[in-house]
Amino acid sequence: MAQLSKDLETALDDLQAAASLQEGDIVVVGTSTSEVKGEHIGKAGSMEVAEQLWSALNAFRLKTGVHLAFQCCEHLNRALVIEANTARHWRLEDTVSVIPMPKAGGSMASFAYRHMESPVVLETIRAHAGIDIGDTLIGMHLKQVAVPVRSSVKSIGSAHLTLARTRPKLIGGERAVYTIDTTSTPDTCE
């Protein structure tokens, strides 16, 4: 069990190295504790596994200052558990009335709800990055342009691991410039 936490810490360090997350950014976390145990998603949830993963995720939150959003399972329409202060900070108003349980919300979201200071549940969010443990489909909660992040860790327990960061859209076509070269003079536009 301790290896789960260590592997997740390594994966989160890889995510931070690629995403350069800033204090206040939101990271969505989707987790199938069943898949971590090598079972079918949604069939063998584990609060013990959730506790091990929480340890690494919370340490990452404290180290980086990011906000965590824990995705519930499909029975709660993949709603998200976040801290109330995160909702206030980002002016997120689509809270819903539900308390995630291991069999309706998932073990990870249920564990997070019980260990946060002041949890609320939202229907949607647009996160800056994400970690998907067990193919829980977090993409719907990422900002519009998601970019895969490769990690030296490919799985957490038996669960497939996917990491993603986001970036702003690149607009303007072939003449657009995306970085400033301070050593040259700008071209004129006709």
Image (cartoon, grey):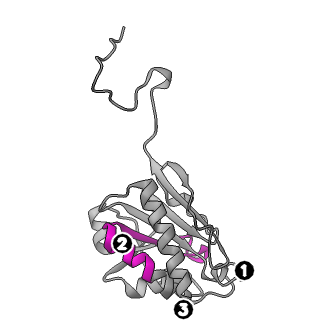
Crowd class of label 1 (few under 14; some 14 to 19; many from 20; radius 10 Å) = some
Residue 183 sits in which quadrant?
top left
Crowd class of label 2 (few under 14; some 14 to 19; many from 20; radius 10 Å) = some
Residue 158 against residue 17 in the figure, above or below: below
Magenta span of residues = 55-79
Tag 1: amino acid? His
Q: Secondary structure at mark 1?
A: loop
Kindly indicate whether the residue at mark 2 contacts the one at mark 1 (C-beta within 8 angstroms): no
Precedes in sequence: disc 1 or disc 2: 1
Precedes in sequence: disc 2 or disc 3: 3
How far is mark 2 from mark 3, CA to CA? Answer: 20 Å
Q: Secondary structure at mark 2?
A: helix
Asked if the magenta segment contains residue 63, the reply would be: yes
Q: What is the number of the mark on residue 40?
A: 1
Q: What is the number of the mark on residue 48?
A: 3
Which quadrant, please, contains the C terminus?
top left
